[in-house]
Amino acid sequence: MTVAKTKFDRRSFLKTMAVGGGGLMLGFSWFSALAKDPKAANLPDEIFEINAYIKVHPDGKVTILSPNPEIGQNVKTSMPLIVAEELDVDWNDVRVEQAPLDTSKYTRQLAGGSQSIRLGWDSLRMAGATAKLLMVTAAAQEWNADIEDLTTEKGIITNTNTGETIGYGDIASKAVSIPIPDEVPLKDTDDFTLIGKNIKNVDGFEIVTGKPLFGYDFTREGMTLAMIIHPPAFGMRLKSYDDTEVRSMPGVKDVFTIDTSIDDPQWSDVNAFNELIVITGDTTWEILNAKKALEVEWEAVSELENSDDHMRKLADAIQNGSGNMERVDGDPEAVAARAPTVIERTYTAPFLPHNPMAPMNFFADVKEDSADLIGPVQTPEQLRTSASQLLGLPEENIHVDMTRMGGGFGRRLYGNFGLEAAAISQKIGGSVKLIYTREDDMTQGTYRPAYAIKYKAALDNDGSLMSFQAKGTGMPGDSLYANRYPAGTLDHYSCEKIPIHTNISTGAWRAPSSNFTASAEQCFMDELAEAAGKDPIEFRLDLFDRAMRDPVGEENDYEADRYAGVLELVREKSNWGQEMPGVYRGVAAYFSYGSYAAQVVDLVKEGDDIKIQKVWCAVDCGIVVNMEGAVNQVEGCIIDGLGHAMYSELTFNDGAPQQSNFNNYRIMRNSEAPAEIEVFFVESDTHPTGLGEPPFPPIMPAYANALYKATGNRYYNQPYLVKDQTMLAMHR
């Protein structure tokens, strides 16, 4: 049995009577005891804390408020599930509510980095266990019994000596007077009755029956609709417009400009276009017609970039540039100079939009001294801070409510659309719902950066890896992690990073950086294994064996045994190595957000077409909280990653995005999805780690490696089924 300390500081706990019913309301800081982990995600430090409330009602029902934004990652189910497990309450008696933004009670009200469960595990358990202990203590006093003689199950307390029972709802009001204990016992993992089971999404019924849960669904009587027009190209700004014709069109209320620039922008305020034209009106159709009719003149204020120039800049940086040498073990260049076999390859990836199912939207009602902001945003606290600057209102007068999101993949970390709604509402002096079209969404920016990585590796005559060099660049930034695999597996290793400037706005995109690095690294590893004359899984496992026995360096991010474990599991489950005529197999494995995933992709040929027959996936994310939700997350990662590997690409001509909707931005079709996906989780007592993103990066290289088996061609440039895969000069 684990014992958790409940008292960390004066703010950790607040216990009050629930309003209007005599139930118990226990407030607590879920993450106040957790040390911040700077390696947990590529997001600011301030994201690592959160609060929540448990409310026990007199009828025995329990309400758990879920503070984190629900973006489809299922935290609105899994976080309360952890609390309910330790609370020993019947899940059928639990009601989950989305909490509003409230930094006096909660911290880390943010969806990003696959960190909610990872960072909340201990404190969520402690919260449920503390509430249970208060009620058991109250029952012991009521019955004049020893607390050791009382047991709990499904919200019922039983005296094992007398057989007396009492429900949580009947004792909750008396539990209020019980002092918070210094320590509380936690369940052994073997005693879990909810965690690890298949639990349905708490909003599932409402979603499939079309209940109004999402930002697009939100409405308030008297509100106006609004749409924006932004510059058509990065490097342009508004010069002038003529709204004479538009103002007389049916349903049009007003045409004006807004500027959402603020003096002290946060990391979440990425936005290429702060000055926008706004059209307000009665219906979306009427506003859309007005957008088409409006006469606008734009002017160039900086370079109008082209995709061909992007490729040349990436190639020049990789071939001739020098940057920050993040890590050097041994002397890899000298080793390569005398090695019998040296292989160099360069991999590229284009800019990508996020393309969530629901384009950006937000509701705002700004008054003289207050504001209501309601909508789908991953960073409500950051939005409130920026809105305070923009509107000139104190933060405590700005109320932010979160709706469910129709996808995000990182796009809704950047709340420019919420600021725009606030600016429009303030301008018109009334409530407004801002709606982006798909074209607005795809061409506004905040894309996945374009990347390139060059690898150089040396092999000895026995096929053993002697040295490994990685050189990465991006527009902007880079995608390399200096202390990830294969760092630590060999004596001679280096990692160099070279940033390139661009005026195209970029931001986090599902599994930031890892989404490309995994492809490049694991495709290169496959080619090295072939050159070494070794099975690709054995080649990788040999390196992990060194990292387990005698790792190089002390800053390696991963646990080699867990990394090797998912490879061994997927090898076993997929019957890797077994003769399968007509099946072309590829494998890859990757570590990100504290978790490990390995995948095998099976392709078959049907005439001239190559079909994805099956994907096998092994994941080590520690304890699986909700098995059904976890499998759904992995399957979603696989489908999403395969579609991007096959087709996704955003190109530019004179600064203008050339793809603006799904008619010219290709995504995977239903008929192209794998016929079957099997997911396996490593059985573990390790605390949960990330899951919403870790299975995403390795599916792309596993697919590319299978394509090589099917076609005989290696793939170096994403997307794999669109570009001419003839090796560019930069690869030679």
Image (spheres, rainbow, N blue to C red):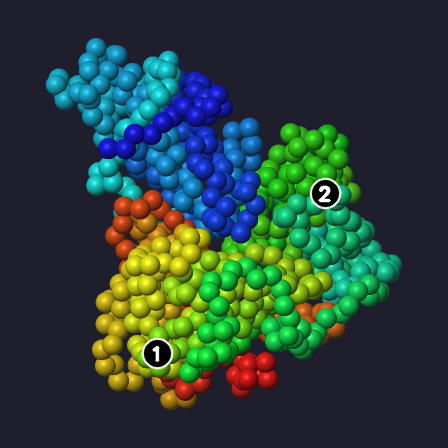
Q: Is residue 507 left or right of residue 425?
A: left
Q: Residues within 10 Å of mark 1 (few under 14, many from 20)?
A: some
- Quarter assignment of residue 694: bottom left
> Does residue 189 appear anywhere in the picture?
yes
420, above or below 234, in the image: above
Question: Where is residue 496 shown, x and y percent of the image?
Answer: 56, 65
- Quarter assignment of residue 222: top right
Q: Amino acid at mark 1?
A: Gly
Residue under numbered circle 1:
463
Question: Where is residue 450 shown, x and y percent of the image?
Answer: 60, 68
Question: Where is residue 152 shown, x and y percent of the image?
Answer: 23, 27
Residue at the extreme left of the image, as rendered? 161
Q: Residues within 10 Å of mark 2 (few under 14, many from 20)?
A: few
User: Sequence order check: which comes first, mark 1 or mark 2?
Assistant: 2
Q: Amino acid at mark 2?
A: Asp
Give residue 601's mark: none
Q: Is residue 357 left or right of residue 487?
A: right
- Which of discs 1 and 2 lies nearer the camera? The answer is 1
Q: Image point 63% across, 48% down: which residue?
A: 268
For label 2, the SS is loop
63, above or below 202, in the image: above
> Does residue 295 appear anywhere in the picture?
no
Q: Image point 82% across, 59% down: which residue?
A: 238
Residue under numbered circle 2:
264
Query: Quadrant of the image for the N terminus?
Result: top left
For label 1, the SS is loop
Query: Quadrant of the image for the C terminus?
Result: bottom right
Q: Is residue 514 left or right of residue 627?
A: right
Q: Is residue 399 left or right of residue 263?
A: left
Question: Where is residue 272 shown, x and y percent of the image?
Answer: 71, 57
